[in-house]
Amino acid sequence: MTIHFYKITDDPRVVEKTLGSPVYTTNANILSSCSIKEPTLVLTYDSRLIDANYMEISDWDRFYFMGEPVLSPGGRCTIAAREDVLYTNKDDILNLHAYCNRCESHFERYAVDSAVPSLVTTIVTNLPFSYHPFSTGANSTQYLLTVKGGKLT
């Protein structure tokens, strides 16, 4: 399998990362059990691996954050890696049509986000009632309560 090593500067929480050209490319074989999500690689040491912090295993079509290479006797180094699920699945993520139930602005009328503090203004208006379907008599008092934008609790 072919492994490409990169030096990236993007935030790990970003879906689209700028890979650029690989700083090192090598071939490897699976010799024993190996996790696809968190592989540990034993490779022949090359000084260009020191500059790398990201890698792609093309045969698996996956991308990984990598730890520091740990040198071993015999010119070998061990690299522990963890899958970057955002970049590995970026096409699916970017083509996803979803409704988010969180809202950064106060202007989304269909997603009331209780975690966003909002400014509440109470307006009390007294209106005289003439004949109205709510009227139960000449001396009765009625109140009509309305709420605009939000929930009545």
Image: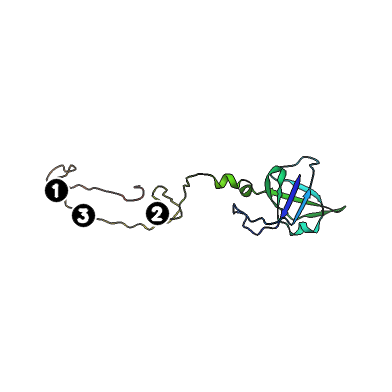
Asked if labels 3 and 2 touch by Cβ distance under 8 angstroms, the answer is: no
Indicate left or right for 134 with 23 as reference.
Answer: left
Q: Label 2 amino acid?
A: Phe
State the image coordinates of residue 151 (x, y, percent, origin top left): 36, 48
The residue pinned by badge 3 equals 126
- Residue at 61% across, 57% down: 11
> From the viewer's perspective, is residue 36 above or below residue 114?
above
Viewer-nearest residue: 7 or 118: 7
Indicate left or right for 76 with 98 as reference.
Answer: right
Cα distance between the residues tagged 3 and 1: 13 Å
Numbered disc total: 3
The residue pinned by badge 1 equals 130
Q: Label 1 amino acid?
A: Ser
**Label 3 CA crowd tier, 10 Å (few <14, some 14–19, many 20+):** few
Indicate left or right for 59 with 141 as reference.
Answer: right
Earlier in the chain: of badge 2 and badge 3, it is 2
- Residue at 72% across, 55% down: 22
Cα distance between the residues tagged 2 and 3: 28 Å
Q: Label 3 amino acid?
A: Asn
Discs 2/3, front: 2
Discs 3/1, front: 1
The residue pinned by badge 2 equals 107
Element at label 2:
loop
